[in-house]
Structure formats: structure tokens, C-alpha cells
Image (cartoon, rainbow, N blue to C red):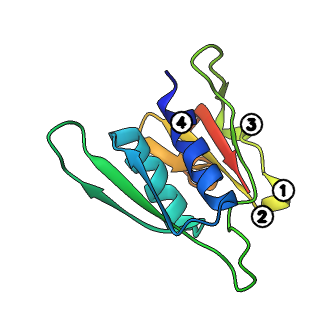
Amino acid sequence: MDTVAQFLTRVRNAGVARHEKVDVPSSKLRVGLAEILANTGFIRSYKVAKDTKQGVMRVYLRYDEVGAHAITNIQRVSRPGRRVYVKSGEIPTVRSGLGMTIISTSQGLMSGDEAKKNNLGGEFICKVW
């Protein structure tokens, strides 16, 4: 089961349905993805609540003045069946800089711009715009 794709799909579907928030099971990878999305302004914030099992993360979605979701689209690039790796010079720009990429590097998850700045490559997790 692809937990990253499940997280991205829940956020995408909640945005289309105009929900204020969405609850997803928590993990270090999902918290890292939510941190990057919050820092770049694609979501408002997130909270992690501990429970008896693995914990639940509540993601608060961001909308503009018209009511359109801040995330137009999220695409999973690297999947469990086909991993995609990029070098630091091969990290693509998404929508002429309006979107972003998320890369899993040896120093943790980071946006594509951060990875380029630090001259790091890694697994190309997803594209967001």
C-alpha cells in the first residue's frame, strides 16, 4: 500500500470537496510532506495527535478569496513499483516556477529548490501546483 499516494489523494479530494480539514494516519514521511506543503503555502497548517496506534495528523487546507483550493493538482511521480531518482541538476521546475517538487534526499525531505541549492539529488516524490 502506497501511503504517500494515499496522503496526496486525501488532500486532493478534500480540496475538491471544499473541506476545511482532513484527517490522515500519521507517519514521519507524511509529517515531512505536510511540513513542506505548509512552509510553501499550499496548506494552512497541520497537527499531529497521538493515539494508541500510530497517531492521526489533521491537515488544514488553504483556499483563496474566491474559494478555490490552493492546490490545483498533486501528482505522485515515484511509486513503489517504479522508483524515480533525479540528480541535483535534473530536478524539474513545475509550471514555470508556480509549482514545486518534493525530493527525498540523504538529508531528509525537501523542496526541489532547497535540493538544488544544497546540490542534492534523490527520490522524486511528487509535483504540486
| Foreground label between 4 and 3 | 4
Compared to 14, does 83 lie above or below?
above
Res 57 visible: yes
| Mark with earlier residue (3, 1) | 3
| Mark with earlier residue (2, 3) | 3
Q: Residue at x 75, y 83 (%)?
A: 66
Q: Which mark is residue 6?
A: 4
**Farthest-out residue, right:** 96
Q: Amino acid at mark 4?
A: Gln
Element carrying mark 1: helix
**Farthest-out residue, left:** 52
Q: Amino acid at mark 3?
A: Glu
Res 119 visible: no
Q: Name the residue tied to disc 2.
A: 98
Q: Name the residue tied to disc 3.
A: 90
Q: Residue at x 64, y 66 (%)?
A: 18
